[in-house]
Amino acid sequence: MGRAVWPAAALSALLWLGGCTPGTPAARAAAPVPLRFALAQAPITLDPRYATDAVSSRIDRLLYRSLVRFDAAARPVPELAHWRELSPTRWRFRLGMRGRRFQDGERLTSADVRATYESILDPATGSPLRDTLVRVAGIRHIETPNPDTVVFVLAHPNALLPGYLTVGILPARLIAAGHHFDHAPVGSGPFAFVAWPEQNRLILRRRRDGQVFDFLTVRGPTVRVLKLLRGEVDMLQNNLPPELVRYLARRPGIRVERRPGTNVTYLGFNLRDPVTGRLAVRRAIAHAIDRRTIIRYMLGGAARPANSILPPGHWAGDPDLHGYAYDPALARRLLRAAGFGPGHPVHITYKTSSDPSSVRLATLIQYELGRVGIGVRVQSYDWGTFYGDIKAGRFQMYSLSWVGIKSPDIFRYAFYSKSIPPLGANRGHFDSPVADRLIDAAGASQNLAVKARDYRALQVYLLKELPYLPLWFEGQVFAARNDIRGYHLAPDGNYDGLETTRRVAAPAAAAGGRP
């Protein structure tokens, strides 16, 4: 941990050499500039039928509107439509007036809703959302009695259907024409697509006032902070080590906001592997990691321990879960009982992205596991390569975060035996009849109290079997120059606050000079 404080000193030296010319009043007044949002990773796709990574999903929320969204308590609320349950297997959605104009000027109708969902349901599309909509939501077919009404007919009753209808709506005519939404999106959201001139630069326009936003991918956290301080970007969110957050909070001209979050960081295991597939090894790993110390020193206290992928305040969460206490002696005993120890060491490859914070976490876990006799080899890759390996099951152990979890159907998506990619996100090939039975029971019940009971029983079981090891719920951090106002930081880290973000006249003390 001794090297963790170097970025602050390096920043001071680099800023002195580089100055702040791009951020001076003269430079800003020379020409109107877009609001610039720095990303740690570029989006992979702008087609909501395929978006499974966090950045793509967050950008897609800006470009498209969906029938349903979630409120702060993870309850479904209307976006494009209000709904009524006509019978246990028939749900009617009536489109309202707001958000029904696509970027190209065409009006959004029930035909577009139907075409969007039928394209996902079509196996030839290859959408990772299909299995959830067919198997869990139970959508059998879709009716459109008039341009303002959509009726979903289900194969089985599902009291939670509205919570599955959060996909951004695409124009039916462009779906039929085979349009490439992944790099040329056309939606009815608050933002319109302008251009994606290069992988590391995406340009959107806010439709209500024409304000342009540049999303600039800057992978190194120190470089992102430098660009913020020098006025080369206007704002950034998350993916910063705590020492850089503290450094930014002390800089004139910069505003830092924090709030508790709901995105969960976890360790994933390949259960088909002869080492990580052994429960004793996974439990030893769980006891060997001092989560509270990592949260305190590496994360600067900006997280809270997690024992499930659902936060305890979620309606289906379990606030009474008790996870694995830090106990390296017990970890060693578990390994010995499993046949490992002197002469028979455990060796694990740990894959992670090349993001510095991710590498530092992997290095720290490598050290802690090494103390109990587990040799860890860390392999870091660019995001695309890393994420591709994880989806393909090419790993023993890895770390990732689930973001924006609202529906407890995440358990079917991530742990059901038939949710192996591309049908879901069961990347570790967890295969448990007990888990399947609990997931099916929770999905079949029409009583929310019974559903919550079954989901809590499932979370107890998953914590015992450890297909994932939940580590912590990440806090959210937003940093911006003082002339940026109106951004609202969301617990799940979405970018919806950009709908109200604006540039104002900067205070004189923060407008110029050397940061």
Image (spheres, rainbow, N blue to C red):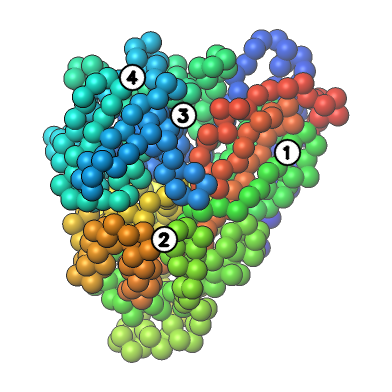
Element under label 4?
A: loop
The numbered mark, 1 or 2, whose residue comes first in the sequence reads: 1
Q: How far apart, in angstroms, are the residues tagged by discs 2 and 3? A: 28 Å
Q: Earlier in the sequence, mark 1 or mark 3?
A: 3
The answer to whether 459 appears left or right of 515 in the picture is left
Kindly indicate whether the residue at mark 3 contacts the one at mark 1 (C-beta within 8 angstroms): no
| Residue at image coords 46%, 49% | 74
Given contact means CB atoms under 8 Å apart, are the residues at marks 4 and 2 in contact? Answer: no
**Quarter-of-image position of residue 308:** bottom left
SS of the residue at dot 2? Answer: loop
Q: Which mark is residue 108?
A: 4
Q: Nearer the viewer, mark 1 or mark 3?
A: 3
Query: Which image quadrant is residue 31 in?
Result: top right
Which residue is found at the position 38% from the left and 17% from the top? 102
> Which label sits on residue 255?
1
* Position above or below: 57 against 342: above
Are the two marked residues, 2 and 3, in contact with CB atoms closer than 8 angstroms?
no
Looking at the rendered structure, the secondary structure element under dot 3 is: helix
What residue is shown with label 2? 316
